[in-house]
Amino acid sequence: MYMEGDVICHQDDIADGLYYIVEGSVAVSAKSSNGEKHLATLQKGSLLGEIALVSQSRRTATVTAVQRCQVLKMEKENFTRFLGIFPQLQESKVFSELIKRRTASSLRTIPIFASLMKKEIGPLQKFDESKLELLGAMLKYKEIKKGDTIFHAGDNGDALYIIASGSCSVSSCVNGDVKRSIELNTLKDGDWFGEMSLMGNVKRSATVRATADTLLLKLDKKNFQCFLSLVPGAEREFQNRIYGRTAKRLSKIPYFNLVNENKPWNKLDLLATLFTFEEFKIGEEIMTQGERGDKFYIIIDGEAKVTAVSPDGNPVNLSSLGENDCFGEIALLEDTTRSATVTSSTQCTLLSITRENFSKFLKLEPKLLEHFRALMQQRSSNTPTTPKK
């Protein structure tokens, strides 16, 4: 028996059982960026607590009695035993439909789904329920223990993740005499990650680990395009984040860190939209000596080697390239052939920009051409025996 105001279960609690409301009603709420958010009111005859048991995760919401309540509870061990006796029940629509509806309801607390809210009148919010229900069917809860890795840099991109509760760190391995990992970002409730691999169809560019026990919503790659069509603004939100990361990377490269940001909008963000992702396997030639070039490259992840054939016909190793290194710059300025070959030493993810797209940007920032020519001259003078790339 629960009295008004009593909490039956807390969000993030370990699931201990399934509840059935015999008498009374309960309020279901979850944490959001604006505090606790009411999701639903459940009446006599309703089940609750099934998501955590079926998906083997922590509680996704807090349930509080709004009046005197009598509930029946089936302990977790008995629930597991019950499904063992009647496995067809779990495979039926009974639980799947219920979980779909409850998952859809929980999406109201996540900022990225705010675009599905049709109107807000005082404390009342009306969402596009049909779209929420479709999303509830596509998104699955997944619990990750503190310290566990969700994915590694170089993995295939198979899903988008949204943090329902918990926290994760994003890190990347820096190449050098000794490889070391640096933390790029910390993600918390409501944040998402993994979209870049799905948008660009490339390998994972960073490693993500749980820094606390974390509950995720996982969207499989096969449902990603449908997700974008259901959530207005999501594709732009994802793309803007990718452009922002690209612009940040560009700001660390000598060619671009002198861009004069004298506009109300960010020029590097605009430049970032002109780059595309490319992927190369181990041993694959990215550019070949003697071929005509029209692209400039920046290494996002992986390593490559630069070689050239000397006048006497012998191959010469010129240098090794790693994350944030760039090459092929002459192709942006001159219609000429490549003076060196660049081959991927590992699986490589690159950003590339064509001469045509770079010329568009020069119209906004003509001084960048001077920087490029000066830096090219400096590179040539510092390495007199090295052919220009």
Image (tube, helix red, strand yellow):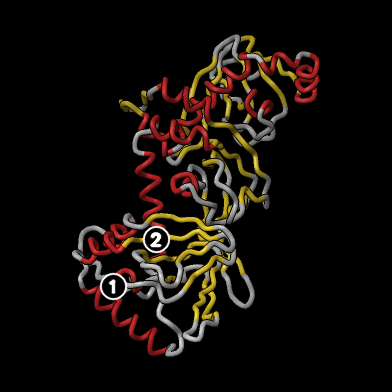
Q: Which numbered marker is on residue 209?
A: none
Q: Amino acid at mark 2?
A: Ser
Q: Quadrant of residue 289?
A: bottom left
| Left or right relative to 58: residue 160 | left
On the image, the x and y values in percent for residue 38 come to 47, 27
On the image, the x and y values in percent for residue 281 come to 56, 58
Q: Is residue 2 above or below residue 262?
A: above
Residue highlighted by disc 1: 334
Helix, strand or loop for disc 1: loop
Q: Which of the image's four quarters has the C terminus?
A: bottom left
Q: Quadrant of residue 388?
A: bottom left
Q: Residue at x 64, y 39 (%)?
A: 143
Q: Is residue 251 above or below residue 4?
A: below
Q: Residue at x 46, y 34 (%)?
A: 109
Residue nearest the viewer, comparing 322 with 46? 322
Residue highlighted by disc 2: 352
Q: Are marks 1 and 2 in contact (CB under 8 Å)?
A: no
On the image, the x and y values in percent for residue 69 come to 61, 15
Q: In this view, which residue lies farthest toward the front? A: 312
On the image, the x and y values in percent for residue 287 come to 45, 66
Q: Amino acid at mark 1?
A: Glu
Residue nearest the viewer, comparing 163 with 20? 163
